Amino acid sequence: MILITVNGERISTNVDPSTPLLWFLRDNLQLTGTKYGCGMALCGACTVHVNGEPTRSCSTPISAVVGKKVTTIEVVGKSAVGKKVQDAWIAEDVVQCGYCQSGQIMAAAALLTKNKVPSDADIDAAMSGNVCRCGTYNRVRAAIKVAAGLKPAASVKPAGAPAAARKSVKA
């Protein structure tokens, strides 16, 4: 029997201890916000927090998180820092396809939890290994700076509004 804590809930399971945390989250708990990208801890799409540390869940066996706290994208916005990061992502219109974004947000939230005023070098170090095929790196950096209060948001866009309604476009 394996006992772990996911998003504040204690869970017991009989899965094989070598099961990757990613698959336990997605298949057993139906927490599908954490994405499978490469399966080799190279792309960051599967990033979760384990005791506050950004961790690649695709290569972390469930046995490695026994007695630790796992936090996923589904609840990161319940923390003050996570909420600021998510709001900044919207304000800076970071997302294109969105596939990597849960991992990006988890990495950014972990950074800002430890370092309230990150430099560009700090941001680069924390976000290295989080691959975005759409190339939104400049917007990711801008959103992290907005969440940290280092720069104003490019624009305020209401959450949930369609992208066309959130952008002011000149004809």
Image (cartoon, helix red, strand yellow):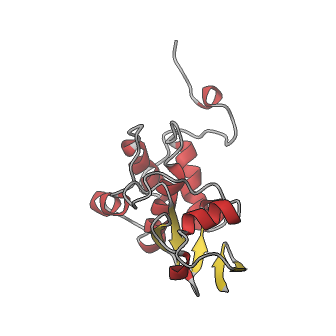
Q: Position of residue 132 (x, y in %)?
A: 41, 45
Which quarter of the image is occupied by the N terminus? bottom right
How many numbered marks, from 0 up?
0
Left or right placement of residue 107 versus residue 126 in this view: right
Q: Is residue 148 visible?
A: no
Left or right placement of residue 32 versus residue 117 in this view: right
Q: Residue furthest left?
A: 121
Name the residue at 57% across, 57% down.
Answer: 34
| 39, 74: nearer the viewer | 39
| 81, 137: nearer the viewer | 137
| 58, 87: nearer the viewer | 58
Q: Position of residue 70 (x, y in %)?
A: 59, 74
Left or right placement of residue 37 versus residue 62 in this view: left
Q: Position of residue 12 (x, y in %)?
A: 71, 81
Q: Residue furthest front?
A: 16
Name the residue at 67% across, 65% down.
Answer: 78
Name the residue at 27% across, 60% down.
Answer: 121
Q: Position of residue 56 (x, y in %)?
A: 45, 65
Q: Is residue 128 visible?
A: yes
Position of 62 relative to 32 (above/below): below
